Amino acid sequence: MTYCVGLKLDRGLVFMSDTRTNAGVDNISVFQKMFFWEREGERSITLMTAGNLATTQAVVSLLNERALPAEERGEPSILEAASMFQVAKLVGETLREVIKEQARNEGPQAEGPFSATILVGGQVHGGDPRLFLVYPEGNFVEASDDTPFFQIGETKYGKPILVRAYDPAMSFEDAVKLLVVSFDSTIKANLSVGMPLDLHVYETGTHRNGVRQRIEPGNPFYETISSGWGAALKEAFNSLPTFKFKDK
Amino acid sequence: MTYCVGLKLDRGLVFMSDTRTNAGVDNISVFQKMFFWEREGERSITLMTAGNLATTQAVVSLLNERALPAEERGEPSILEAASMFQVAKLVGETLREVIKEQARNEGPQAEGPFSATILVGGQVHGGDPRLFLVYPEGNFVEASDDTPFFQIGETKYGKPILVRAYDPAMSFEDAVKLLVVSFDSTIKANLSVGMPLDLHVYETGTHRNGVRQRIEPGNPFYETISSGWGAALKEAFNSLPTFKFKDK
């Protein structure tokens, strides 16, 4: 499994992904699930993947190959697409193409499709920052004021705190803290989500990649939040009024 | 879906279940998922169900029929079983029997088995209070000091707070508060879990059913916790140190 979150804030976009991949419980590896494309001053695009690793790596490789300036293939490029909507469309088409290719009806067959889901967000000059959730079928939905964040992968454990503490006006620092709490809750509950974590903060209007950081196991901030959150939760719990039984 | 939790405390057992059943999103009903058997002074047994409603109702009906004193069928009865282990074994065998019966190879067939999972706990005179999670295959596991609570149904949203705030020495009042927080997080995130909630508190050594209460929508305590928890969480979140970007 996997856990990735994209947050849309007033001041920009914040992305966080884990790096654990597993086939069963005894084949565990670290793979990057966050990828970037940039034309400084013109566009910054961040993409995060969940699902079959062969599929998502093929999608990213294809997007990269087709973005090479040397080759004039006539194929659409993620660095040329005119808007974030066109970027999401391109990602969706590439994802659909890869899954279709791998499921073709000859040779050895897998039991299910090698499916995947993708979050892609960023800003292309002339447009607002936008965040999309792309489905294996190639279609996609966009984050809005009503639903200002997307999660993919193992989403349930870390959702309640996002729902409660997210605020579009929050600072980037608070957003990172929120994501760390959400990831920590997930990592504590599910073996298939693991450190290190990748972080990217995109600031609206810069049209360049922002702060990128890998949060390694033992990262002091992560450790502080992880141990502090338990105590803070208990305190929050104790601050609520106590239940009283009817008949007492 | 469903959400049920059984907590094993130093002073007894606490059970909570929701009451929503759904087939798709437009066929929603309220059904009790918590059932009781009692011989005052000798045993108190609580059972909670998740899964196919036809299956779980059949299991409960069979357990009830076979507990009727009038009939001397020679079949084991939940009111006669010599220990909680034997009770769990009986529940497992009955569950397995019902699923097997419904899956027999004639007439119309469903796509999957009409599966179900059951939590059963209580105390039989001469033994300690015990709590079991019974699988569709009829086998079961018991709650221990290391894993002192079981959840069935839609378990993920409400798990982080249970993991963080559970304490075997907690009072019944705090345990109910904890369950309300866990249920509220789940209900806020998942349409298939819904009010009202059923509650049963069993006190070790009493060998009789304890406080039973139905928490209806609009229950003042539930409302206080539900609205207060958001604010308490935000405060807990704010009490943690702020993230600092490396390069700032």
Image (tube, coloured by chain):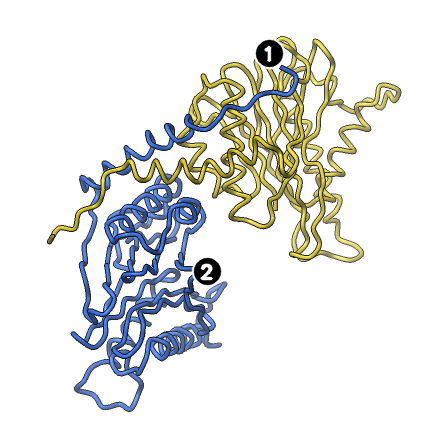
Chain colours: A blue, B yellow
The one nearer the camera, B16 or B236, is B236
Callout 2: few (<14), some (14-19), or many (20+) C-alpha neighbours within 10 Å?
Answer: few
Q: Quadrant of the C terminus of chain A?
A: top right
Q: Eyeballing the image, is A227 above or below A31?
A: above
Q: Secondary structure at mark 2?
A: loop
The one nearer the camera, B211 or A94, is B211
**To which chain does the residue with label 2 belong?**
A
Residue at 24% across / 63% down in the picture? A202
**Tag 2 residue:** A146
The one nearer the camera, B63 or A80, is A80
Q: Position of residue A183 (x, y in %)?
A: 33, 46
Q: Eyeballing the image, is B101 above or below B106?
A: above
Q: Position of residue A247 (x, y in %)?
A: 66, 17
Horizontal placement of B25 versus B177: left or right?
right
Q: Which mark is residue B127?
A: 1
Q: Position of residue A181 (x, y in %)?
A: 32, 43
Q: Are marks 2 and 1 in contact (CB under 8 Å)?
A: no
The one nearer the camera, A95 or B139, is A95
Q: Position of residue A246 (x, y in %)?
A: 64, 20
Residue at 56% across / 38% down in the picture? B152
Horizontal placement of A200 versus A117: left or right?
left
